[in-house]
Amino acid sequence: MITSQGLIELGFTRDDFRLQDNSDGAGVFIADWNSGSPQPSVAEIEAAHTTWQTAYDAQAYARNRKAEYPSIGDQLDMIYHNGDGGDTFQAAIKAVKDKYPKP
C-alpha cells in the first residue's frame, strides 16, 4: 500500500508527490511525481511505512502521558500553593507515568 508516511519516511516531502485514490478498488497510487529523485517502488514505500509505524507505535506511551499530564499552570500551582515541597505535583506526574509506563 502506498502511503504518504512511507514516502516521507524515505525522505520525500509532500511537495514531491500527490497521492490519489479513485475509489475504484485499485487503492492509492502516485498521481504526480515532482521529485528529482527516482520514484520508489511500492515495496520500498511499504517497508518505510512499516518502519515509521513501528517508531510511532513505540511512542504511544508518550502521547498518552502528554494528554493526561496536568497543564503547566496546574503543575506550577501544585508546587506553589500546596506547601508540600512539590509532593502533590510529583504524585500527579507519577500517577500518569505509572498508568502509561515507558516500554
Image: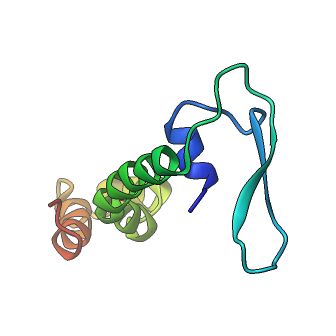
Q: How many marks?
A: 0
The quarter of the picture where residue 3 lies is bottom right
Name the residue located 37 percent from the left edge and 68 percent from the top edge: 64
Frontmost residue, 60 versus 43: 43
Direction from residue 65 to residue 13 in the image, left or right = right
Direction from residue 35 to residue 97 in the image, left or right = left
Direction from residue 42 to residue 80 in the image, left or right = left
Q: Quadrant of the N terminus?
A: bottom right
Where residue 23 sits in the image (x, y, percent)? 81, 78
Asked if 62 appears above or below 36 in the picture, the reply is: below
Name the residue located 34 percent from the left edge and 51 percent from the top edge: 55
Where residue 34 sits in the image (x, y, percent)? 80, 30
Where residue 41 sits in the image (x, y, percent)? 55, 43
Name the residue located 65 percent from the left edge and 22 percent from the top edge: 37
Frontmost residue, 92 versus 16: 16
Where residue 19 sits in the image (x, y, percent)? 76, 53
Q: How is the image coloured?
A: rainbow
Q: Quadrant of the C terminus?
A: bottom left
Asked if 27 appears above or below 42 in the picture, the reply is: below
